[in-house]
Amino acid sequence: MLKVISFTICPFVQRITAMLEAKNLPYQVEYISLSDKPQWFLEISPNGQVPVMITENGTALFESDAIAEYLEDAYPVLQEGLSAEQKALNRAWSYLGTKNYLPQCGAQSSKDGQTLKERAEKLTTAFAKVEKVLGEYRFFNSDTLSMVDLAWLPLLHRAQIIREKSGYDFLAGYPKVQAWQEALLETGLAEKTVSKDFLEKFSDFYLSEKTFLGRCKNDCSCSALNLEERCQETGCCELGEASNMDIGTGCRC
């Protein structure tokens, strides 16, 4: 059976477990602490990061891009009949999604409004790009799930949690991305691909009193488009720093 080595709130891991779920492949998950990595893990992970996936042959694969491509090559494909060009485009849009995991983590962990605004710029640019290519399909480029959908799922899942808990909307102004988010979340994959205590641990880190978003009230309806104006109008958030402590991104997995 396939085995995934994971850290609870790591988006790179969720991308892989999403592919396993979408392909209906049996797998196990073992969670480790990134602050106290076991020696056996360091011996099989050249970069010391998760995810690592142990194949059915006992080979340890690392880097989520490589693992995702292995799962697409070694098991029945998610989309049938794709041309070489379409496969390349799927990989490229998948890469664009994963490149924004760390920017999203950084934005979520911002300790003041100005930092959130600055850190969210790259993420907003990515959502603007994908907004332009989304069409009439339920998912990214068809009515069936693709590698691209599963690569963007962690971003869209976390954006939903942030919106529900704080009122801040990373997707404001991007109706096609919002519809895509809704379609992906309706599949139930988001809940299936994280641990049972994911929401608690995610909230403890990104929505605590140490973060700007943690201090937002969930009725503020703020976004990257109106952060300063809306917060000043409603008094819903503290625009200043909560402390001088930098909690980092929480996403160095």
Image (cartoon, rainbow, N blue to C red):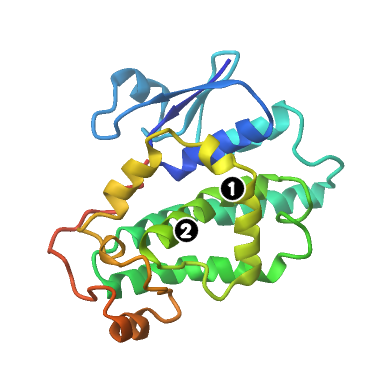
Residue density around tag 1, few if under 14, some if 14–19, many if 20 or more, within 10 Å? many
Query: Which residue is depicted at the point 30% across and 55% down?
Result: 207
Query: Residue 9 occupies which quadrant of the picture?
Result: top left
**Is residue 128 shown above or below 2?**
below
Query: Which residue is depicted at the point 62% across and 64% down?
Result: 177
Which of label 1 and label 2 is nearer to you?
A: 2
Q: Position of residue 137 (x, y in %)?
A: 78, 58
Element carrying mark 2: helix
Query: Residue 215 occupies which quadrant of the picture?
Result: bottom left
**Amino acid type indicated by mark 2:** Ala
Query: Residue 242 occupies which quadrant of the picture?
Result: bottom left
Query: Which residue is depicted at the point 31% across and 82% down?
Result: 234
Q: Nearer the viewer, residue 131 or 35?
A: 131
Q: Residue furthest front?
A: 219
Query: Which residue is depicted at the point 61% across and 69% down?
Result: 129
Q: Which quarter of the figure is the C terminus placed in? A: top left
Residue 42 placement, left or right of 1: left
Q: Nearer the viewer, residue 82 or 239?
A: 239
User: Would you say residue 64 is visible in this rendering?
Assistant: no
Q: Which of the marked residues, 1 or 2, is nearer the chain's N terminus?
A: 1
Residue 228 placement, left or right of 129: left
What label does residue 197 carry, if any?
A: none
- Label 1, label 2: how many angstroms apart (C-alpha)? 14 Å
**Is residue 116 shown above or below 60?**
below
Element carrying mark 1: helix
Residue density around tag 2, few if under 14, some if 14–19, many if 20 or more, within 10 Å? some
**Amino acid type indicated by mark 1:** Ala
Q: Position of residue 84 (x, y in %)?
A: 81, 47
The residue identified by callout 2 is 159
The residue identified by callout 1 is 151
Q: Position of residue 70 (x, y in %)?
A: 64, 31
